[in-house]
Image: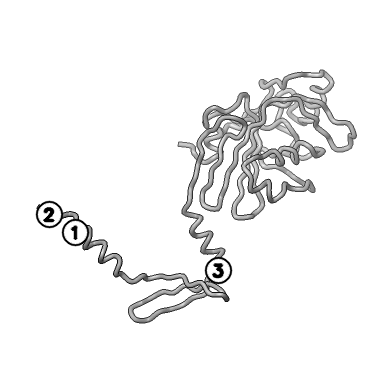
Amino acid sequence: MIDTSMWACQTLSAALTEQPSLMLSFYSFGVMLCKQEGSVIHEYPVDPAQIALALAAKVTFDTGLLSGNTLLVRQDGVKRTVVEYRPPQKTGVYLEGSETALRVPLPGLVMVRTTTDGSAPQYGVFAVKRRPDRLDVPLFHAPIPNVFGSGAICWGTVQRVSDAALHATSLAEDWRSLLGTPFGDHACSGKSRSHPQDIRAKLVALDVQQATRYPVSDLIPVKKTLAQLLGEAT
């Protein structure tokens, strides 16, 4: 019968006596990577930030679908994705050239924000007919100007959100930046069955009608689900 405890002790002893092939040495002037090849040791200067990125790239985290308005938070190395739901509600919408906001009901909206190592955030904004309770919920074009068919936002000269907001998991400041700024004439077509040429005409009509709910039957499908948007399509 093999004595596994003795074998384990011998394996551990051998591992502890093994010499490392790579070492990081931290000095007051910087960080050096030491690589040993036989009796020869080579040293290379390295950037601590690159070391941190390489280590962080191994870390993954995914909350799965959550309750509340924050639907999902996913961390994949230095890449973070936050998905948030905005329930249907009446909203003040400003159009360029007008000093008075339209009071219109907007459908439920989903915003996806992805940040990677301090680079400019990437956005996707879509409409949904109900709050997503699973990832295969179908997406629709957001019935507002300045949002392209891909869901990307045409920010123009709008001031982006603060660095503090980009490090948070709340998209409240992102929503305020998007909906609190006058909309121009970009990306206005293909978002309404009744007003296919210009979604602004639909918004004006809803304001005149004093509508209380956005007619979800008027939404145009993107032919993509939330799972597909997040790269989880099977």
Q: Position of residue 226 (x, y in %)?
A: 56, 34
Q: Residue at x 90, y 34 (%)?
A: 99
**Type of amino acid under label 1:** Trp
| Closer to us: 19 or 73 | 19
Q: Whole-Å distance between the Cαs marked 1 and 3?
A: 41 Å
For the residues bearing labels 2 and 1, Cβ distance under 8 angstroms: yes
Give the residue at mark 1.
7
Q: Position of residue 234 (x, y in %)?
A: 45, 36
Q: Position of residue 139 (x, y in %)?
A: 60, 31
**Type of amino acid under label 2:** Ile
Q: Whole-Å distance between the Cαs marked 3 and 2?
A: 48 Å
Q: Quick one: label 3, few (<14), some, or many (20+) residues within 10 Å?
A: few
**Type of amino acid under label 3:** Asp
Q: Circle 3 — which element? A: loop
Say which quarter of the image contains residue 149: top right
| Closer to us: 230 or 221 | 230
The image's mark for residue 47 is 3
Q: Whole-Å distance between the Cαs marked 2 and 1?
A: 8 Å
Q: Quick one: label 2, few (<14), some, or many (20+) residues within 10 Å?
A: few
Left or right: where does residue 117 sit relative to residue 36?
Answer: right
Give the residue at mark 2.
2
Q: Circle 1 — which element? A: helix
Left or right: where does residue 142 sit relative to residue 49?
Answer: right
Sequence-wise, the earlier of marks 1 and 3 is 1
Q: Quick one: label 1, few (<14), some, or many (20+) residues within 10 Å?
A: few
Check the image and name the residue furthest to the left. Answer: 1
Left or right: where does residue 189 sit relative to residue 116?
Answer: right
